[in-house]
Amino acid sequence: MVGIVLVTHCNLGKALIEAAHFISGNLKNIKAVSITDESPEALRRAITKAIQEVDEGRGVLILTDMFGGTPSNLSFSFLEPGEIEVVTGVNLPMFLSAINRQDDDLKTLARYVKKKAITSIVQGSEELG
């Protein structure tokens, strides 16, 4: 099972976990790291700890909230092909799709959740108009 770490500003990751738990029930191998005003070193330690806690040997997918922000910039330093992947722009449909496909291999899962996030964004007037 691929582990999942949400690295987000403030408590967004924790809120996504709470919403996913409400929708899907029990979640496994998932942690959130909240980026606050802690030092970069403390934040890196928190991300490292979360990765270690969810890693079962099949890889870890890090989902961040915003490309170019501190959560993504810190997370990119953990990139390791085949072992740790980072996908930015996390939203609830992306996160739910990741949870439902944790048995995929890491590369397949990362590609799938990226696609799912993009297709989950809809402009109402285009869809309903």
Image (cartoon, helix red, strand yellow):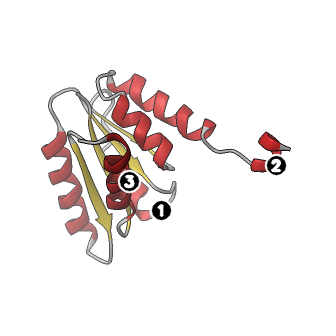
Q: Position of residue 121 (x, y in %)?
A: 64, 45
Helix, strand or loop status at disc 1? loop
The quadrant in which residue 7 appears is bottom left
Q: Label 1, label 3: how many angstroms apart (C-alpha)?
A: 23 Å
Label 1 or label 3, whichever lies nearer to me, is 3
- The 10 Å Cα crowd at callout 2, few under 14, some 14 to 19, many 20 or more, is few
Callout 3–callout 2 Cβ contact below 8 Å: no
Which mark is first along the chain, 2 or 1? 1
Give the residue drawn at x 22%, y 27%.
1
- Residues under numbered marks 1 and 3 in contact, where contact means CB atoms less than 8 Å apart: no
Residue type, numbered disc 3: Ala
- Relative horizontal placement of residue 120, taking residue 39 as reference (left or right): right
Quadrant for residue 120, please give it.
top right
Residue bearing mark 2 = 125
- Which numbered disc flags the more N-terminal residue, 1 or 3? 3
Q: Secondary structure at mark 2?
A: helix
Question: Which numbered tag is attached to residue 69?
Answer: 1
Q: Is residue 77 visible?
A: no
The residue lying at 38 percent from left, 45 percent from top is 23
Counting from the top left corner in percent of width and height, residue 39 is at: 26, 74
- The amino acid type found where label 1 is placed reads Gly
* Vertical order, 53 against 107 (above or below): below
